[in-house]
Image (cartoon, rainbow, N blue to C red):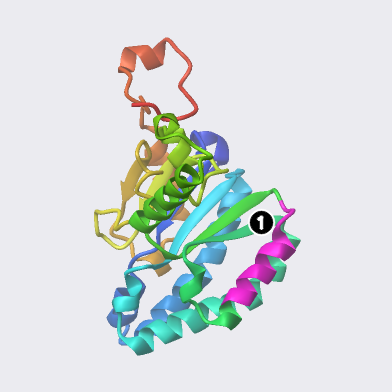
Amino acid sequence: MTEAHDTTIPQHIAIIMDGNGRWANERQLPRIAGHRAGVENVRLIVERCAQLGIKYLTLFAFSSENWRRPPTEVRLLLELFSVALEQEVERLDDNGVCLQVIGDRSGFPGKLQRRIQQAEKLTGNNDSLTLIIAANYGGRWDVTQATRKVAMAVAAGELSPDDITEETIANHLCLTKLPEPDLFIRSGGEQRISNYLLWQLAYTELYFTDCLWPDFDKVEFDRALTSYSTRQRRFGMTGDQIDHADMPTTSTA
């Protein structure tokens, strides 16, 4: 795909940016060099999304399980995240990108938490593209914290257990005000979603590629979009129903 009109463009794309460490190992570089190259590639993909009119891009930057990695790598990853925020936030703001960070921030150093808050405040009114960074995020954590909030509402007498619906839970998830992802992309060859947006990916089209994240350029990105354009999203209905009716905008079983 070379032009935006060659495919149906998804409104929301979610990506697991996998393969930075292997990219570095193949070049006999330290793993952090791969993560730095991965950050550089984020800028390219953000630019491509803006060019194509994609409205939401969610990137899995640091999972709640990544704390299990060697302490030195964890420390360098957090430092890289902090530096990237400082260096990129003005560029994002100048290009109308709204930055949001989802996940449990309480585990981050205070300096990083402040930089996240400052970046979100600076870009909060932008609307050309919303860039969501999932950091110290896990899908099970997301559902758990949403369930806890609903339970607190029940305990306070604000909500009856009989009134709890899927929508009730969804309204307390991290991406509550955003449309669910249309397309999920994972680079690096693994074919699993790794505790990422477990609730939100229920009806998302999945795309896996062997390409390592630092090499996942615009050509690879457009290849994923072309694959997406061939999918028929049925949302529990039959193909014939889709052919003769408007596709629902929200997922229903």
The residue depicted at 39 percent of the width and 65 percent of the height is 213
Q: Can residue 104 be seen in this view?
A: yes
Q: Position of residue 61 (x, y in %)?
A: 44, 67
What's the magenta bit mostly, secondary-structure-wise?
A: helix
Is disc 1 placed on a helix, strand or loop? strand
Q: Where is residue 82 in the image (x, y as percent from the top left)?
A: 56, 79
Q: Position of residue 60 (x, y in %)?
A: 43, 61
Q: Residues within 10 Å of mark 1 (few under 14, many from 20)?
A: many
The residue depicted at 44 percent of the width and 41 percent of the height is 169
Q: Does residue 53 appear to the left or right of 173 in the view shown?
A: right
**Three-letter amino acid code at the position of disc 1:** Cys
Q: Is residue 30 visible?
A: no
Q: Which residue lies furthest to the top in this view?
A: 244
Q: Does residue 199 appear to the left or right of 79 in the view shown?
A: left
Picture layout, residue 6 above or below residue 14: above
156 drawn magenta: no
> How many circles with numbers are drawn on the protein?
1
Q: What stretch is highlighted in magenta?
A: 113-126
Front-most of residues 226 and 12? 12
Picture layout, residue 11 above or below residue 162: below
Front-most of residues 100 and 168? 168
Residue 139 location, quadrant: bottom left
Q: Label 1: which residue?
A: 98
Front-most of residues 197 and 220? 197
The residue depicted at 42 percent of the width and 77 percent of the height is 35
Quadrant the C terminus occupies: top left
